[in-house]
Structures are given as structure tokens and as C-alpha cells.
Image (tube, rainbow, N blue to C red):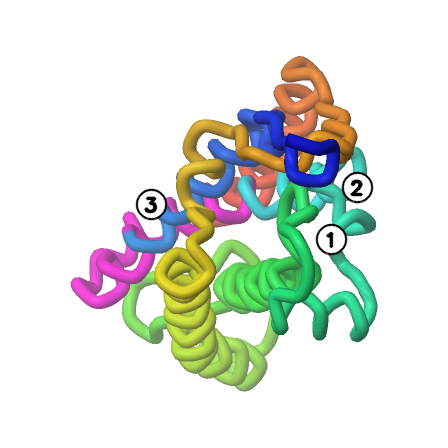
């Protein structure tokens, strides 16, 4: 086996990124179900937890492990086109160029969902933590955006699952397993990504959680 075909197993996803991913999946399901059941107390608690996760992920995208950093996977149009075509060997350690922009879109609309939720008002008993600081028409407008943005998130989630299915069925690439165990097989000539220490992640998450708790303290 020559150097171009030899492969080795390397760690591509650190534990904090994997925990973020699966915790976010669980909390999004909880948020959707509690909204449908009008369990708004639990819906808001879930939203506050998602806020902490998003703050962590945004910071981890700047200071975290190589594969978690936005600068690593947000690439130009040519790289996106090559990824969509599936041209060449799989040399992407984490998200490929197309998947990277999909992640960015999901994070963007999740931030919009949480942000509008902070000002939402159901006109009955529940208000977002910052709803008290803006006028009623603005609250109604942001509440409407909060409700409609759910459909965009559902569409992005469906696209995400479909892409995973496509890669598994057509390109014979399992994208889920590396996000569970953290490792994948890559060509041996590719250097393993640098991983940030767990202590750094704990510190970043502690800061994110503190901000989320401060936001929640405005809840009337």
C-alpha cells in the first residue's frame, strides 16, 4: 500500500464539540415538543440551555480545536463546489466546505431563534427575559419571527439528515460515527488536527453558562 492510499485513524472531533452536538440535538427536540404542548416554562428553560450551548459554540469556533474553528471549515465557492461534486479523496478532517456552510447557516438561524425568543411574548403568562424592555408592537413582531423561524430550522434539520443519508448511501461515508467516537480514517499523509485541552473548554462553557444564567435572571 503506497503513501497515497494508506490510511490511519486520527481524532477529528474533540469531546466538547461532540457533547455540544448531541446536547443541542436533544434540547432542540425538547424545545419543539414543549412548544407544541404549550409547556412554556420548560420551553424557556430549554431555550436558556440552548443559549449557553450557542455561546459556547461561537467561542469554541474562535478558540477551540482545529476542526471546530470557523476559519478551518468556512471555505470559498470552489472548495464548496468540489465538496458537492465529491471530487478527489476524502481529505476533510472535520466538516467539508459544503458542510461547513451548512453548519454556519444552522448556527445563524439558531441564534435568530434564541435571540427573538428573549423578547417573545405569548400574551397570556410567559415573556422572554428581555420582553419587558421593548414596546408591545416590537414584542409582537419578534414573537412572529420566533414562530416562523421554526420552519426554517426544521427545513435545515431535514436537509442535514438528508445529507447524512446521501453520504452514507451513495458515497459510503459514515458522518455520524465520527461525531460519536471522535475519530475517523484519513489518508496517512494528512496531519492530525490540533486539539484544545478539556480545561479550556470547561472555562469557555462556564463563561457561556454564566452569561445564559445572567440573561435568565431577567425573567419576571
Q: Is residue 133 something one can see in this rendering?
A: no
How many angstroms separate mark 2 from mark 1 (CA)?
12 Å
Check disc 3 and report its element: helix, strand or loop. Answer: helix
Q: Which residue in the structure is indicated by mark 1?
A: 73
Residue name at image x 45 percent, y 82 percent: 144
Residue 191 is labelled as none
Residue name at image x 37 percent, y 54 percent: 28
Residue name at image x 46 percent, y 60 percent: 171
Q: Is residue 179 something one can see in this rendering?
A: yes
Q: Nearer the viewer, residue 95 or 39?
A: 95
Q: Earlier in the sequence, mark 2 or mark 1?
A: 2
Q: Earlier in the sequence, mark 3 or mark 2?
A: 3
Give the side of residue 154 with respect to residue 103, left or right.
Answer: left
Residue 26 is labelled as 3
Would you say the magenta stretch is mainly helix, strand or loop? helix
Residue 13 in percent (x, y) is at 59, 33
Residue 62 is labelled as 2
The region drawn magenta spans 30-52
How many angstroms separate mark 1 from mark 3 (CA)?
24 Å
Quadrant where the N terminus lies?
Answer: top right
* Label 1: few (<14), some (14–19) or many (≥20) C-alpha neighbours in 10 Å: many
Amino acid at each position: 500500500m503506497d503513501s497515497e492510499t494508506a490510511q490511519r485513524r486520527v481524532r477529528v472531533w474533540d469531546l466538547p464539540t461532540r457533547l455540544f452536538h448531541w446536547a443541542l440535538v436533544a434540547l432542540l427536540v425538547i424545545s419543539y415538543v414543549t412548544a407544541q404542548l404549550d409547556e412554556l416554562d420548560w420551553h424557556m428553560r430549554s431555550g436558556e440551555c440552548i443559549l449557553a450551548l450557542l455561546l459556547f459554540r461561537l467561542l469554541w469556533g474562535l478558540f477551540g480545536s482545529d476542526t471546530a474553528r470557523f476559519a478551518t471549515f468556512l471555505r470559498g465557492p470552489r472548495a464548496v463546489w468540489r465538496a458537492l461534486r465529491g471530487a478527489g479523496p476524502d481529505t476533510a478532517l472535520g466538516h467539508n466546505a459544503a458542510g461547513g456552510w451548512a453548519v454556519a447557516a444552522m448556527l445563524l438561524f439558531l441564534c435568530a431563534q434564541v435571540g427573538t425568543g428573549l423578547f417573545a411574548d405569548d400574551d397570556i403568562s410567559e415573556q422572554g427575559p428581555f420582553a419587558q424592555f421593548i414596546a408591545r408592537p416590537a414584542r409582537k413582531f419578534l414573537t412572529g419571527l420566533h414562530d416562523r423561524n421554526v420552519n426554517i430550522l426544521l427545513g435545515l434539520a431535514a436537509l442535514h439528515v438528508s445529507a447524512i443519508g446521501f453520504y452514507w448511501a451513495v458515497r459510503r461515508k459514515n458522518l455520524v460515527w465520527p461525531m460519536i467516537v471522535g475519530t475517523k480514517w484519513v489518508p496517512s499523509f494528512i496531519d492530525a488536527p490540533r486539539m484544545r485541552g478539556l480545561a479550556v473548554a470547561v472555562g469557555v462553557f462556564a463563561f457561556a453558562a454564566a452569561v445564559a444564567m445572567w440573561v435568565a435572571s431577567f425573567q419576571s
